[in-house]
Image (cartoon, rainbow, N blue to C red):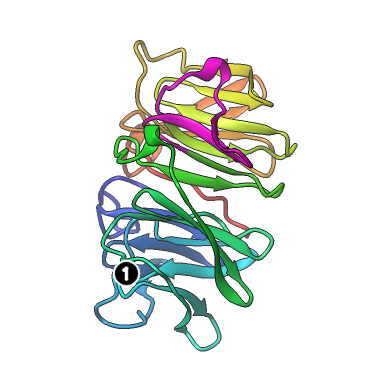
Amino acid sequence: GYGDNRDPHSVPTRRSSDLTATNGAWIGTKKGILQLVQPTWKDVPHTEKSARFEAHAFGANPQQMPLAVNSTDWLVKFDVERNEWDNLLKLPFESDSRQFLSMPLNGRLWILNADIAWQVQLEPPAVLRQIELPQALRGSKDPPTRLLATVQDKIYAYGGGGAFRLESTGWVRCAPDAASEPVVSMQTLKNGSSLLVGLRDRVERWCQGKKESSWTPPDVPDFHSLSFARETSDGRIILGTKGLGLYIMHGAKVTRLTVRDGLPSARIVCFWEATD
């Protein structure tokens, strides 16, 4: 996902959210959802003309057809065979506020609406519970608050006020040394026990509340522009930055890609691994 339109095949909007690979590539934008059909983007039908799929109110992965929250407060699912959106569940909140969808796991997902996280069951569709965000994350905009659900049924909330894990007693700060630094991204690593955590000036690995390792780009003095960090299926670590291009870490080898290497923009906002 790029931050501008310098390439004719790049995303045709500056208000993009998530790019992923499910039966092709998908992106959720403020003006709707687009599907990548090489070599151009095409519109995917909306449930209605007034529907607006806001930034990050959309998600998909290779095992799950695209899901979204629309402007009429419905959780909707895309039917590939009919090329239409189906209403799954009328949500008990107004969609005027910013939303975020976690990736579906074990037939459930989390929807963040304003300062409340809602757990939703997909079959049969139902709202299971709602939980207020920790005070430190309420109203966070830079970076915005997001959610991470894991296969172990753990849920994390992170953003400008740091990172928290939901326990039976409530939200618990889960950063090493109880730090409250802004967290821009979180991902469960393939080993299932560690987290890849993106901070503004570095990327860290956390395991059971302890920092295992930390890395900062050595070629950029006073680095404070990380936008995300993700692990690929072959173990590489992809770091996106706000203006410095892309870093690819593979063992001890680090490769940096910029516009000089063919990237349409040096501002990288998201990354999703394709399955083809």
Secondary structure of residue under mark 1: strand
Q: 75 and 14: which one is in front?
A: 75
Residue stretch rendered in magenta on the structure: 158-182
Q: Is residue 223 left or right of residue 177?
A: left
Q: Residue at x 31, y 65 (%)?
A: 95
Q: Residue at x 40, y 69 (%)?
A: 92
Q: Which residue is mark 1?
A: 32
- Is residue 236 rendered magenta in the image? no
- Is residue 180 rendered magenta in the image? yes
Note whether residue 37 is visible: no
Q: Crowding at label 1, few (<14), some or many (≥20) Cα neighbours within 10 Å?
A: many
Q: Which x, y percent locates residue 257? A: 44, 32
Q: Residue at x 62, y 33 (%)?
A: 195
Residue at the far right in the pictured view: 191
Q: Which x, y percent locates residue 230? A: 55, 38
- Quick check: 256 above or below 39? above
Note whether residue 219 is visible: yes
- Quick check: 37 above or below 135? below
Q: Is residue 152 left or right of residue 76?
A: right
Q: Is residue 187 left or right of residue 202?
A: right
User: Please, what is the three-letter code of the amino acid marked with disc 1?
Assistant: Gly
- Quick check: 241 above or below 2? above
Q: Which x, y percent locates residue 256? A: 46, 27
Picture quarter with the C terminus: bottom right
Residue at the far bottom in the pictured view: 82
